[in-house]
Image: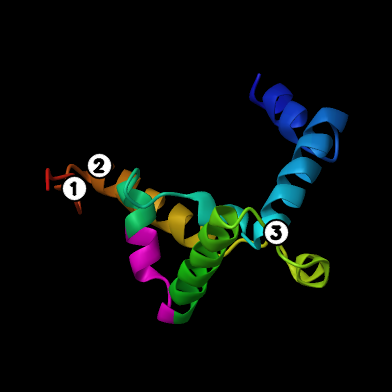
Amino acid sequence: MASLLQSLLDPKKNWLAAQHMKTISKRLRNFGLRYDDLYDPYYDLDIKEALNRLPREIVDARNQRLKRAMDLSMKHEYLPEDLQAMQTPFRSYLQDMLALVKREKAEREALGALPLYQRTIP
């Protein structure tokens, strides 16, 4: 069952998945974003922890891309075509660290340790 689902979602095997990926790529290029920029650190504490562990330069670049995208969106504009061609929307910078954080969280739960962080009401 899992392999069937993976084959349906794999853009190399499924034409609809490839078209969806192409559409997402085009929309991300319009604003100069990467797919990992769409993860919200306020929604998932694992993402917040992964962002905290990344080098400062990577987090600063992410914040700059998000600010530029918001600015372009408010102006109802897109990046110039030459800058859109240089964008790499599916180059990941967060997935490896996020996988490490999730593995550590699962290991802590398996050992019965206290969670590393808990959601608090501000």
When the figure is inspected, residue 55 is found, relative to residue 91, above or below; the finding is: below
Q: Which residue is mark 3?
A: 78
Q: Residue furthest front?
A: 75
- Give coordinates of residue 115: x percent, y percent: 18, 48
Q: What secondary structure is marked by label 3?
A: loop
On residue 109, the disc is 2
Q: Residue at x 39, y 49 (%)?
A: 102
Which portion, as a residue range, is magenta?
Answer: 49-56
Classify residue 68 as left or right of residue 108: right
Earlier in the chain: of badge 1 and badge 3, it is 3
Classify residue 44 as left or right of residue 55: left
Q: Disc 1 or disc 3, which is closer to the eye? A: 3
Q: Disc 3 or disc 2, which is closer to the eye? A: 3
- Give coordinates of residue 50: x percent, y percent: 39, 60
Earlier in the chain: of badge 3 and badge 2, it is 3
Q: Which is the main secondary structure of the residues drawn in magenta?
A: helix
